[in-house]
Amino acid sequence: MREAVLEAARFLADGRTRRLTLEDVADHVRYSPFHLARAFEREIGLPPGKFLAAQRFQLAKELLLDTGEKVVDICHEVGFSAPGTFTTRFTAAVGVSPHRFRRLPGLLAEHPPEPVRVAGPD
């Protein structure tokens, strides 16, 4: 079953820009959706839907930093159909909105973080 779960994870990562359902993934690895979902969460630590969302947000972060594409275009490119939903879910997952995430490198360059000092022996 572990190999099927790993193949399912690869399938989700490779298909992160497409509309995928749990049934699509289960068909790909020839397991029932119910059994695959349980095994996937046990092996990977996330349900398949959250794993797919994480893959999409990772791609979105790369596109936000490496391209000048509009957020709405990135939203569609990573498999979301509604920009509002994308922005809400991205903000919840990443901690900042897509627009703010795009500005982070400049903000950090202007105001670099202070080194963290921990009390105690070196």
Image: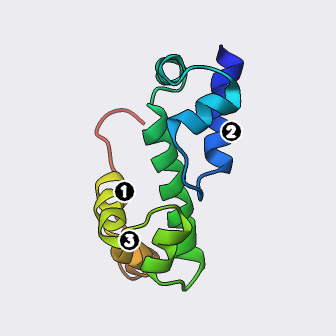
Task: Give whichever of discs 2 and 1 has the lower sequence position.
Answer: 2
Expressed as whole percent of the image width and height from the top left, the position of residue 37 reads: 48, 24
Q: Secondary structure at mark 3?
A: helix
Please state which of the two labelled residues, at mark 2 or mark 1, is closer to the viewer: 2
Q: Which residue is mark 2?
A: 10
Q: Is residue 114 above or below residue 16?
A: below
**Mark linked to residue 94:** 1
Task: Give whichever of discs 3 and 2 has the lower sequence position.
Answer: 2
Expressed as whole percent of the image width and height from the top left, the position of residue 4 reads: 68, 22
**Mark linked to residue 18:** none
Q: Tell me the quarter of the image containing the N terminus.
A: top right
For badge 3, the amino acid type reads Pro
**Category of crowding for the residue at label 2, using alpha-carbon neighbours closer than 10 angstroms: few (below 14), some (14–19), many (at least 20):** few
Q: Which residue is mark 3?
A: 98
Which residue is depicted at the point 36% across and 60% down?
90
Which residue is depicted at the point 61% across and 43% down?
12
Expressed as whole percent of the image width and height from the top left, the position of residue 16 reads: 59, 53
Q: What's the distance in space between the residues labelled 3 and 2, CA to CA?
A: 26 Å
**The one of 29 and 39 positioned closer to us in this rendering:** 29
**The one of 20 and 17 positioned closer to us in this rendering:** 20
For badge 2, the amino acid type reads Arg
Which residue is depicted at the point 28% across and 39% down?
119
Q: Secondary structure at mark 2?
A: helix
For badge 1, the amino acid type reads Val
